Amino acid sequence: NILSTYSSNFKMRLSFSNKRTTVGDPMRGVTVHHLCTDFLDRISEAGIDPQTCKVYEIEEKVIRGLSKDTTCPRDSRPGSTYVDTLSEENAGIATYMISYSWGYTVRDICDTLQSFCHQQKADPKRTFIWICCLCVNQHRVREARDSGTVVPFETFEKEFRNRVLSVPKGVIAMMAPWSEPLYLTRVWCVFEMFTAVSQNKFIAITMPPTESTSFSNALSSTEGEDSLNKMWKSLGNIDVSNAAASVEGDKINIDKAIERSIGAERVNETVATFMRNWMVSTAKQEVDRVCKDVNVPGKEKLLIISRTGDLLRKTRKFEDARAVLKKGQSLNFNNTKEYAVVLMTLGSVDRNQGKLDAAMHWYELSKETHKNSGTMESLDYAALLRNIATIHEEKGDFPNAMKTYEEALHVHVVTNTQTTTDCASTYRDMGSTCRKAGNLKGAVLYLNKAMKIREALDIIETPDGALILLDYGRCHTSLFDQNGEQNDLTEAITFIERGLNIRRKIGTWTQEDENNEKELARLRKFQTSNLFACAEKSCICS
């Protein structure tokens, strides 16, 4: 594994502290400038396309091929790390470590590092990167793999932590594609991020420029919500226990390290929370950028503002959401559908904080704007009607709520959007109203429709998806309390547990979920007592 050489040489750092050369230092890194120039040229000279090749495709011909004739200064044997073949002009003690996957293209890695230097105003010629493929002796890795040698767990854990702590300026985590990051499926990447977060190291999540553009487009396009849902799903699916590794020994050691610390579930939550905060922060930065850019059309600005405001609302950052949305108010595009969405989202922020009259005020303004812009047959107008219906529901006016939901469904029919996430949200809210009104069969019917739409689109692991699951579980809780049916008890436990797990993973846990957990504990006691009673009855019969 990649620590086999590193772990046996870490103490060598002390012997290099008083020397001018950094050759052989375990924390020697390569400059961003070299990676983006000479290194790409060497790949091309090896007959490989540097624009499309992935790291594992250059390991034999380039990484080992160019270092096989160099004596390793760390063990005095033939074959060195790639970085030890470089001059002091192109290598030095690493200032940053990059956390990435060998499944990324070399071009994307280089573009990501260039983008990072630009963002940090860092000189690429003086920014030294510790990157495992070039800074670990791949000849020794290959030998260890061929001989079946495994690094002892204690050595692995100690030296891995030392490596993360040794980079003075922090970790660059490469994220691509942004909506479904390969990064989050690799055990090394997840563990590296967790270790850096838990050690309070600076972490810069950085994307290739193409992915930054894609993220911006997602915030400003009508299809953007689907991309954001994919990101929510990725956060919900983070599972370090099932993450992959190229070397089985690495996977075993990382699993042991996690077991000895806080456990896989907490690691998943820590990484997901960090990623969620990054997504929201990046969206806020995009709002600041477009608001200053006179070349960005006003309607596009409003779309980015409303979507970012909604992201902040869903993560319960209400004051931040309000501040972002107020920027949209200041733009002079009052009679547009996009402006109506900004007003609606302002209303939803107030509604989430229990300010129902203030929320209805914003919703009425949004409705008037839709009317003036001629956009009353659109998905956004259906969403507005759904939000207005929710106000009626929360005030206990269930008949008016259902009537307004029916109007929203009519818009979905007219616009042929009955299989969209928006329509799923309408069904979900209709189910919630039916449940509160005591119509449990109607609630189950509508919530089932909502679930089927989201499952067909494969986007149940989102804030809205978790809400559907929780409401469905609550319905079966009420049915169980009414009739004591075992099937309702099982359904209630299954769906409440699933909804809470999603919220926990993606970091959208609310105070209400504390009550949901208590309810889940109550239901489990019933389940345990029922199983015990059945077992006791079986013993008596036998």
Image (cartoon, rainbow, N blue to C red):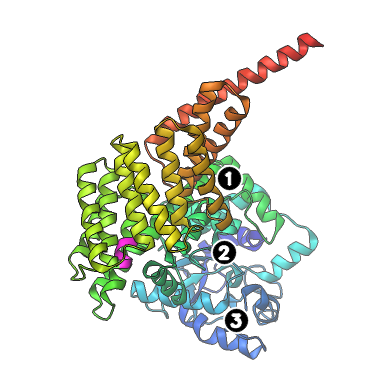
Residue displayed at 66% across by 73% down: 56
User: Mark 3 vs mark 2: which is more N-terminal?
Assistant: 3
Q: Position of residue 197 (x, y in %)?
A: 44, 52
Q: Nearer the viewer, mark 1 or mark 2?
A: 2
Kindly report the distance in space between the C-alpha atoms of the residues bearing marks 1 and 3.
34 Å
Category of crowding for the residue at label 1, using alpha-carbon neighbours closer than 10 angstroms: few (below 14), some (14–19), many (at least 20): many
- Closer to the camera, 313 or 210? 313
Q: Where does label 2 land, which residue? A: 182
Q: Position of residue 425 (x, y in %)?
A: 43, 50
Q: Is residue 248 magenta?
A: no
User: Mark 1 vs mark 3: which is more N-terminal?
Assistant: 3
Q: In the figure, 234 relative to 57: above or below?
A: above
Residue displayed at 73% across by 12% down: 537
Task: Examine the image and state in which quarter residue 76 appears.
Answer: bottom right
Magenta segment range?
A: 303-307
Residue displayed at 42% across by 72% down: 212
Please indicate, yes or no, whether residue 506 appears anywhere in the rendered image: no
Q: Secondary structure at mark 2?
A: helix
Q: In the figure, 286 relative to 484: above or below?
A: below
- Closer to the camera, 517 or 404? 404
Kindly report the distance in space between the C-alpha atoms of the residues bearing marks 1 and 2.
21 Å
Q: Where does label 3 land, which residue? A: 52
Q: Secondary structure at mark 3?
A: loop
Q: Position of residue 122 (x, y in %)?
A: 36, 75
User: What amino acid is at disc 1?
Assistant: Ile
Magenta span: chief secondary structure: helix
The label on residue 258 is 1
User: What amino acid is at disc 2?
Assistant: Leu
